[in-house]
Amino acid sequence: MPLRAGLALTAALALTMVIALQSPLFAQGLKSEEAIDAIVGSEVKTEEVEPETASKRIIAAIGVTTQNAERVRKTFSLEELDIVLLPDLEKKGQDIAKAIAEHEKEIAVLREAIEGSALFFHAVDSRSIQVRDVVALDYGEDGTVTIFVKGGVNGN
């Protein structure tokens, strides 16, 4: 008798699992605003800035890219995240472009760190920004993180 009871229980459990796998899932996708806000923990702000107006700050952030990549890997919550779009970077930001070229390997490591972080990746992805366009990241003293991105609102 115990063998039959065990088989019946196993069959019932298997049937339950088959039905559960056939049912549509009601979980939120990672593309929904609620999921992104839950991951990021705060609103993601986006603004467009001319490269020459923020060049000193961007160049300084590029200079500490290795340290910032390590911080990205260790960051699990943020007070505020700003994404700054830099239109016409190649034309108007020669000093920035030079710093990017000099720190190309470090910036690649930063991009990998962003891709490996649900927090940062979904913040960037939620604004339809490609990680390959990230040129620098800056941790502010007030808990704000700013990500600088090549291109403008229209991808310029």
Image: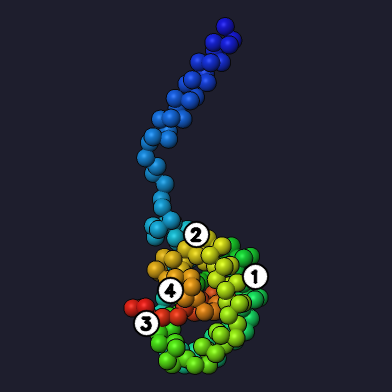
> Which of the two discs, 3 and 4, labels the residue nearer the N terminus?
4
Residue 71: x and y in percent read 63, 70
Residue 70 image label: 1
**Disc 2 to disc 4: CB gap under 8 Å:** no
**Disc 2 to disc 1: CB gap under 8 Å:** no
Label 3 Cα neighbours within 10 Å, binned few <14 / some 14-19 / many ≥20: few
Identity of the residue drawn at 44% across and 87% down:
89
**Residue 52 drawn above or below residue 153:** below
> Which of the two discs, 2 and 3, labels the residue nearer the N terminus?
2
Residue designated by label 4 = 45
Residue 156 image label: 3
Tally of marks = 4
Q: What kind of element bears circle 4?
A: strand
> Which of the two discs, 2 and 4, labels the residue nearer the N terminus?
2
Identity of the residue drawn at 45% across and 80% down:
150
Query: From mark 1 to mark 3, how far is it between C-alphas?
Result: 29 Å
**Nearer mark to the viewer, of 3 and 4:** 3
Query: From mark 4 to mark 1, how far is it between C-alphas?
Result: 23 Å
Label 4 Cα neighbours within 10 Å, binned few <14 / some 14-19 / many ≥20: few
**Disc 4 to disc 1: CB gap under 8 Å:** no
Query: From mark 2 to mark 4, how far is it between C-alphas?
Result: 15 Å
The residue lying furthest to the left in this view is: 154
Query: From mark 2 to mark 3, how far is it between C-alphas?
Result: 28 Å
Residue 39 image label: 2
